[in-house]
Amino acid sequence: MTAFFKTPEQSSTTITELMIPSYANFGGKVHGGILLSLMDKVAYACASKHSAAYCVTVAVDGVEFLSPVEVGELVSLTARVHFAGNTTMIVNIQVESLQPRTGIVKHTNSCYFTMAAKDEHGKLTTVPGLKIETKEDLVQFCEAKSIRENSKINRALLANDMQHLSVDEQIKFCENDRCLIDIRS
């Protein structure tokens, strides 16, 4: 059986949407939850194009809102598969907003969505590998692989390390942080 590969460009997806008043939060800016929903949508479209399967979101890494988005701006979200594993893909999303009147474009955030492909029975299914054709694609693949490995390490640390420490060890771990520990037996 020959392995099947696709380039990142083959699944590249861009969605552009007008930011309307109902998207605004109490501060008058576009609510971060609206942007996250749009990121999830474009990640799904990109991963589905790559895998030719139904996809679900497994994890989101590196979401930082760098610049507020205003009502009336056009937000474009571009997604590309940067890493393909057996059944999962890491999709990079770049978000930019355009102020139509001035033509000013600003990068508002970028992040990584880990998406898993499922078959018609809801079982994980194999995805095509990633065909690397440029040095930039290779860098992006390595960065996404690093994110994947670090995410696994962090989840393992959170799941195991803190639960296995004694209360005294946990208190020592937190001693230089802004917390007041007042545990009563």
Image (cartoon, helix red, strand yellow):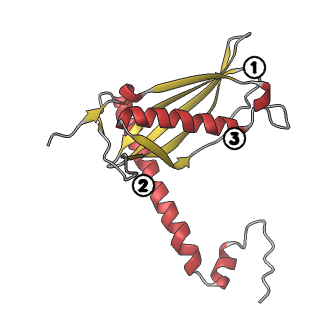
Q: In this orientation, does residue 81 appear?
A: no
Instruction: Name the N-terminal-most of marks 3 and 2.
Output: 3
Q: Nearer the viewer, residue 182 or 18?
A: 18
**Mark linked to residue 72:** 1
Q: CA distance from mark 3 to mark 2?
A: 27 Å
Q: Which residue is mark 3?
A: 33
The tally of labels here is: 3
Q: Nearer the viewer, residue 120 or 8?
A: 120
Q: CA distance from mark 1 to mark 3?
A: 17 Å
Look at the numbered disc 2 and give the secondary structure of its residue. helix
Q: In this orientation, does residue 80 appear?
A: yes
Instruction: Name the N-terminal-most of marks 1 and 3.
Output: 3
Residue shown at 44%/51% (left/top)?
Answer: 148
Residue 96's spot in the image, x, y percent?
Answer: 62, 25
Label 2: how many Cα within 10 Å (few below 14, some 14–19, many 20+):
few
Label 3: how many Cα within 10 Å (few below 14, some 14–19, many 20+):
few
Do the CB atoms of the residues marked 1 and 3 lie less than 8 Å apart? no
Vertical relation: 181 (above or below) 58:
below
Residue 67's spot in the image, x, y percent?
Answer: 71, 32
Q: Tell me: 92 left or right of 97.
A: left
**Mark linked to residue 149:** 2
Residue shown at 81%/36% (left/top)?
Answer: 25
- To which quarter of the image does residue 109 belong? top right
Residue type at mark 3?
Answer: Gly
Residue shown at 49%/55% (left/top)?
Answer: 151
